Image (tube, grey):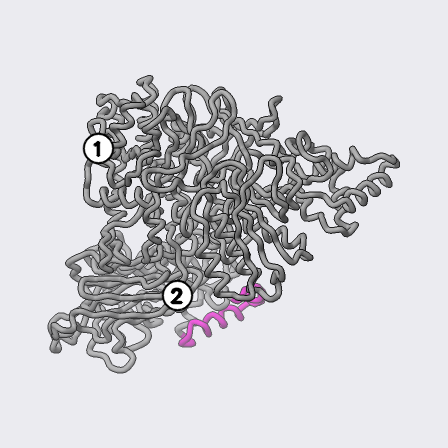
Amino acid sequence: MSTAQLATRPEVKAAGGKHALENFVVDDLDDEGSREGSPWLGLANVIGSTPENIERYSELTEPQFRSPAREDTDSLPIDITFARGGSLILDPELPESPFLIPLSSDGSAGGRQLQSEVLAIRIPTLERVRSDIARSSQLTIRILPANIANWVGTVELAGDGSLLAVGRFVKPRGNGRSAAPFRLVALKVSLATNDPLAPWVRSDLTAKGYIFSGMQTFLAAAPFKKSGALGKVTYLGPMDWTPSSNPNELEQDFAEELPDVPGGYQAMLWHPGASEQPLLDGVALKVHPVLEGLFPLRFAPTGDNEFVADESTFRVRPVAAGGGHQSALLAAAVKQQVVPDRPKPATEESVRGQAEAFYASRLVAGDHAIVGALGHIMMPSNESTRVADARPQDFGATLMPDSARRALDGVSYFELDQDFVNGVEAERFRAAFLALNPAGLLLRQDVRGEGVDFEWPSRTSWRSLWGSAELHEYLEAYSHLVDAARATGKDEHVFWAAYPMSVSVWDVRGDEGCQSVLLSPLHPLRLAWLAGAEHILFEAENSVQHAGSIEGWNIPLVGPGESSSARMLAVPTDSGEDQIFLGWSMMLPPGKSRPRRLTPPDRIGNAVTPGTAVSGLNATAVDAALRSFRKMHPHITTLTVDLHAQDRQIRLSEIDDSVLAVAEEWGNDDAGRLMGGVRVLDSVKREGPVPKDAVTRMVRENRDMLLTWSRYVPRPDSKVWCNIRLLQDSGTTVRVGDGGQAYGVLGNVPLRRFESNLNRLTERRLSLSQPAVPGHMGWAPFSRALQACESDQSAPIVEAGMLRRDVADVTADWTVMGESFLSPAIMAELMDAHGEGARMLWEWRPPVFERSADVPFMERRPFVSIAKVPDSFGHQLEKLLAKATGQEDTSALKSSVMSKLGSRGVGLSSLLSMGGTHVAGGSRIFPDIWPFR
C-alpha cells in the first residue's frame, strides 16, 4: 500500500463521493512506511500525527480499514488471453468466472513437461505506467496451491498503455495431489513492497482458474451456487496428464451420479482435435468462442444422459434418477435438458407426434419440398392416412397425401396462384426460415441405436433465438407475407400465408371444408412465444413458482378461414405427455352469423384428434378444484366425481390423469385418506381411450384404496347426482365478427395475453370480447405479426355464450369449468338470469401459485365453480341483513349480496362452512365492493 493507492481528495471529489480518508493528510505516508518497514505501521504513524486524523480514523468502516486502497474492483479485473488474442474466460456473465488454462507437452522431459501457450495477463493499474518502470519490475504471478504450475514470463506495456504479464504456465511432472489432471487454482499478482510497480498495482488482485491437461478428453461439471458462482468440480476422465500410447485405451467410458442442485451444473467438455462435434444425447454441442477444444454447457442431469466425444463416452445421471421433462419449455424452468428417453409410443403415433417427426426428419435431411410448401400440411378428417404420406401438391405449394388431395378436388376449389407462391414475399419468408438454422438445431446423432437422427421441435431448445436478428426477420417476413396475400384479394392465399408450418384438417368427403388448423412450434408466432418463454424460464431464479402464469394456447387467438366469411378461433387443447405439446395451438371454425359450438373433427388422418376443452379446463385446474372442494367438505368420506358430457366430445386425457393422481394420493395418504374412496362417473359421450390400465394398476398396487370408474349414458332430462361435476366443455358457443377495437395487451416478452376491456353481457346474453393487440405494443415485430394474422380491415369481435342447462344445474354440490371465453363476472350475470337464485353461488379461483407434485406447473388455469348454498347459510345471512337494515324481508338483498360477491371473485365457496363467521364475513365485504359494481 502506498499514497497512490489511497482514495485521495481530488479523485473522491471528482467522482462526487465521500470517503473517510478523503481529508487525511497523507503526504508522509510513503516515508513513514519505508522507515517502519511496513505500510500499515506507516499509516498508523500518519494517523496519530494530528488529532484531526485520529478523529477521522474513528469514522472508518471495517471494509475501509481493511482495504483503504481504491475499491473499484469491478472496473479493474484481471483478464487472461492468448498472446494471439482471445480471452480464456469461461463465461463473462458468470460471477467470478474462472479462466481455463490448458497445458500440453512441448516434447521435453520425455513428454512429461507440460506448459500453456504464450499468454498475456492484463493487469489493471491505478494510473498509467511508464515503460521503464514496467521493465524494471519483478512482478510475477503466483499459483495457489503451490506446485501446480509456475509462471515464467516478463512484464510489458501493451500498445494502449495497459500493463501485461506475458509468458507461460509451466508444470513439471507432478506427484501427490498436484498430479490431478484438472485443478482449481487461484492466480495472484505478486510483487514486493519496494517494487517499482508497487504504487500503481494493487497487491490484492486475484483471479480463479482451472489448470488442466489439454491433451486428454474429459468432462468436468461444477454446480451453480445461489450466488451464481461455481462450486466444487466433479471430474470424469483419465487420471493421467498425457494420453496413453496403448491403442486399446483410446475407447473410454466414464460414469458418475450428480446430486440434484437447484441451479444445475456448468458442464465443461474438453475434446482437443475433435474429428466430429461432441454430442449430448445426440444433440451437437457448441464450441467455446476462443478455446477450440472446449464445449461448455449449462446442464442438469435428467436421466441417463450421455456426452459422446469420438471414442469417449461420459454417462451422467442424477443421484435420484427418474425426473426430467419431455418438453423443452418445462426443462428450461428447472434448468435441465429434456430427458434422453423418447416419448411413449402413443405420443409418437398421435397426429402431433407424426407431424413433429415429419418436420424434423425432412428439415434435417435437407428436403426442399417442405420449405417450398412453407411447411403447410393438409390432412383429411375422413381418410385413414399418416402425416408421413404427405407429398408435394399444387406444384409444391402444399403437402398432402395423394388420395386425400384427389378426394378434396371433388368437393373443394382450393387453388393457389404460382405467381404468389413463388413471389418475393414467399421467397423472403423461406430465406428467413432457413436463416434460423432449423436443420442444425433439430439435428440429433443416433448414439443409442434408436434409428432416429433428429429431435422433435417440441423437445428442442429455441431460447438461443430470443432477441436474435434472425427471429426478428422471421416475424417481419411473416407479416409482409400475410399482408401481400390480403392484397391479392384471394382467400386461399391468405389462408396459406397465415398458417405456415401448420397442419390443416379438411373434410374431403363433404362440404365442411377446413375443420381445424394445428399450428406447430415452427410457426412464426408459436416459435417466438416459445423462444421468449423458454428464455425467461431459464434465466429466472424462481421459474417453477411462476411458470403457471405463462399461457400460450391463444397466440394467435383468431385467424383467417378458407373463405373471406370464415374465421378460425384457438381453443385450449390437450398438451400431451408431460405437456410435450405446449408449443402447439389448435384452431376451430366458430359461428359466422350466430354463436355455435366449437366442434373438432373426430380424427385427423389415422389418429384421434387431440382433446379440446373450450372452457379452458385442464389438469391443473381440476387438481386445484378437487383439493379446494375437499378442504370445504372435510366430512365427506366418499367423493363422487362426474366427468360430464351431454354432447359428443374428444376426451381430454389430462383431466382423467389429474383425477386419478388425486385419487391415488387420497388413497395412500393416511392423514388425508378418503375412507369411502373415489367414485368416477364417466359420460359415454366423452370419446377416446378410457384409462382402464391406469385404474387397474392403482387398485392392484393399493388393495386398501377404493376406486371405481364407470361409464354412463347422459339423459337430456336428468343428470346423475354427484359431489363435483367437471365440465370439459361447458356448452360454450362462440361467434367471431368484425368491427372491434384493439383492447389486447402484451408485454415485451409475450408470455401471455390480456384484455383491458370490461366484458359485459349484450342484449342477447352474450359476452363481448375485443382481444386484438395494437401493432405497436410490446415487442413490435411480434405484435405486428400477431396483428397481421388476427385482423383484416378491422379488429375481431368474439361473442360467447353458454347453454342454460349447465347454469341451472342443481344435481352437483359443485359444478366446475374453466373461463376461457367467459369471465367470472359474465358467468355470474348468466347465473342471475338462468340459475336457481339463492341455491347457487359462483367462485373464481386461480390456481397459478398452487403446486401439486403430480400436476404440471405450466399453464395453471383458473376454474369457476357453481356451488349449492345450504339453507342454514341462507337463513343466517338473512338474519344478519335484517339486523343491519331493519327490514323483515331481505331475500332480494340476500341474492344480491351472494351474486355480487361471486361476480367479484371473492370466493364464496370458501365461505360455505356453517359457522357464522363466514356469513358475517361475506356480509361485511359486500358494502365495500358494492360501490365498484
Coordinates of residue 788 in the picture (x, y in percent)? 39, 27
On the image, the x and y values in percent for residue 382 come to: 34, 34
Q: Position of residue 266 (x, y in %)?
A: 34, 61
Residue 656 in the figure: left or right of residue 327: right
Q: Residues within 10 Å of mark 1 (few under 14, many from 20)?
A: some
- Name the quadrant of the N terminus: bottom left
Q: Residue at x 27, y 42 (%)?
A: 359
Mark 2 vs mark 1, foreground winner is 1
| In the image: residue 775, left or right of residue 682 | left
Label of residue 392 in the image: 1
Q: Nearer the viewer, residue 260 or 354?
A: 354
Q: Is residue 228 visible?
A: yes
Circle 2: residue type: Ala
Residue at x 35% of width, y 50% of height: 346
Residue at the farthest top position = 489
Location of residue 318 by image quarter: bottom left
Mark 2: give few (<14), some (14-19) or many (20+) Cα within 10 Å: some
In magenta segment, residue 37: yes
Q: Is residue 637 magenta?
A: no
Q: Which residue is mark 2?
A: 321
Name the dominant secondary structure of the magenta segment: helix
Q: From what the image shows, is residue 604 above or below residue 208?
A: above
- Which range is magenta? 35-62
| Lower position in the chain sequence, tag 2 or tag 1 | 2
